[in-house]
Amino acid sequence: MFNKLEYYKPDIEKTIKMLEKMYQDALEHRGGNVTFRALPPSDYDFYAKFDLTKYNYETDLEKYAQDLCILLKKSYELRKDIDDNMVPIISPMLGIGDYSAFVTGDITFQPDTSWSTPSLKKVDDWKKLPPLGTAKWYKKFLEIEEYLLQISADSGIPFMRGFFSPLDLAGTLRGEGIYLDFYDSPDELHELLDYCAEATIMFAEDIYTLAEKYLGNTKYGMFYSKGVINMSEDIACMISGDLYREFAAPHTQKVIDYFGVGHLHTHSRSMYLVKEVCSLKNVANLWLPTDPNAPRPIEHIEDLVNDANGVVLAIDCENFQEIVDNIEKLKKGNFSLTLPVKDVEEGIRLTNKFNELIK
Amino acid sequence: MILESISLSLQKGKAQDVKTFVKEALDNKITPKEILDNGLIQGMNIIGEKFKNNEVFVPEVLIAARAMNAGLEILRPVLLSEGVKPIGKALICTVKGDLHDIGKNLVKIMLEGKGIECIDLGVDVAEDIIIKAVQEHNPDILCLSALLTTTMNYQRVIIEALKKTNLRNSVKVMVGGAPVTEKYAKEIGADGYSPDAASAANLAVQLITEGV
């Protein structure tokens, strides 16, 4: 179905080298890298066309994989002339419910998202769960992944999968009760978080092993998987820096240490936590999208450069002028900038303009 | 002094201490209204302000709310017997399609912390249920929460439904949730919007007492 990766990204070698250098500099706390991604509507509007409620997840997994790949292919085809830092990827898209249902529970699908309901009434109820790896959605996810890889592996397009951090996973499994656990049951909460770290390691290991089977002999297929773990720290924005340091950080670090390098994600609502998150060892990247009604990272570059200590911050901008105005400050750290553009033509034009600016 | 102890214990989430101090205050013949206003509500007001300023976060708000409820368990029967009424009534829910309730729950806590009675319709609540509840409970405020860009449009649907059923003028509508902005709130014809739970409670009080 897909053409070779080089078809969608003619200068893939240059892009990968640029990203590798940036992440390596980040690990060595050395700034100086600013990269750019144009975001035309075709990069995201296919989500709206992909109705998650359309599939029977008992019988339609192959059809699901085919439909997703058709949409991804169209999206990558449309933007192939944009010479930015974006690397096409193949990744299952099941909403958000699968991020915790691989441990236990079922997924409720809506057309464009999904969720699973909290299943741990008490903080130590995880001890009563069946062994990891036996849950319905653990197996189903791997089946879906395999269909996707069977369709796409020949192209060499990298496979990528993100995970909840142990705190996010524990928060989803436990629900709102977790906020009281911080004070009522701190030891038991640490046990739950450790269980979540173990669960993530096991699931990611199985996902990566399967990806390696199909992509191991491709040049870039494992770029986002081998030695890397992508995790969200979403609910961290609900807690203080002190609680993050005490409860979340050690368990997130455990998962990063297992795989080697962490690419993390939180929201601009958590800007006060950037220093904490970037203090974890071997974090190369922190995706920090702007929330509505929250501070905009692009307006706080100097603070962020200090707090990130070299970690690449992936942030969004509203217009090109913001980049021009901040470019010297941005160069002091490592930044991956995303700019929404009205169409591919504008994406090409502004990417070229950025490439001139950064020379 | 005892009222300050109630407020401080509440802020620290010490539910048992709050209970003890409320009992002690009642024994010392402090009026239940004074205990409510200058002990419990005072403590929650401070928590609300600190929450707004990122000095405390969700766990601290929830343990404070639990401590407030512990105090209210003791105080509520006395308040009722003395005819002390809440300053107003609010209906609150997340709109259809949205199961994310942390924002809604925080607003509810802050509203109760201001002495507003809250009827919680829960999550994923459809138009007909909300309309029926407005007719049944006749609230001063209707609070509609949405976390997703895909569900926030349902806030508009509810406002339109209130107009169609001639209920729009009988209730003030407040909207909130991560993607909701003041501009959007005005656009859909809501009466109020706040970026955080503590400001929402302040606004609710203003809407109830001043009507604007």
Image (cartoon, rainbow, N blue to C red):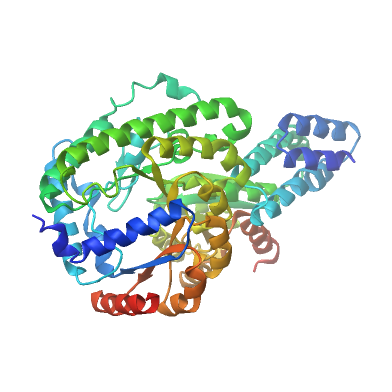
For this rendering, which residue is in front, B22 or A182?
Answer: A182
Observer-nearest of B175 and B54: B54
Q: Residue at x 74, y 35 (%)?
A: B71
* In front of the other: A193 or A6: A6
x, y percent for residue B168: 51, 65
Q: Position of residue A63 (x, y in %)?
A: 12, 46
Is residue A72 in view? yes
In this view, which residue lies farthest toward the left?
A1
Q: Quadrant of residue A49?
A: bottom left
Task: Judge whether B63 appears above or below B57 on screen.
Answer: above
**Quadrant in the rendering for residue B203:** bottom right
Q: Taking the image as drawn, is residue A265 in sight? A: no
Q: Position of residue A26 (x, y in %)?
A: 44, 55
For image coordinates 52% across by 39% down, the residue present is: A248
A79 sits left or right of B49 in the view: left
- Assign the C terminus of chain A to one quadrant of the image: bottom left
Quadrant for the N terminus of chain A, please: bottom left
Image location of residue B68, percent across then percent down:
70, 39
In the image, residue B64 sits, relative to residue A88, either above or below, namely above
Left or right: A15 with respect to A153?
Answer: right
* Observer-nearest of A9 and B82: A9
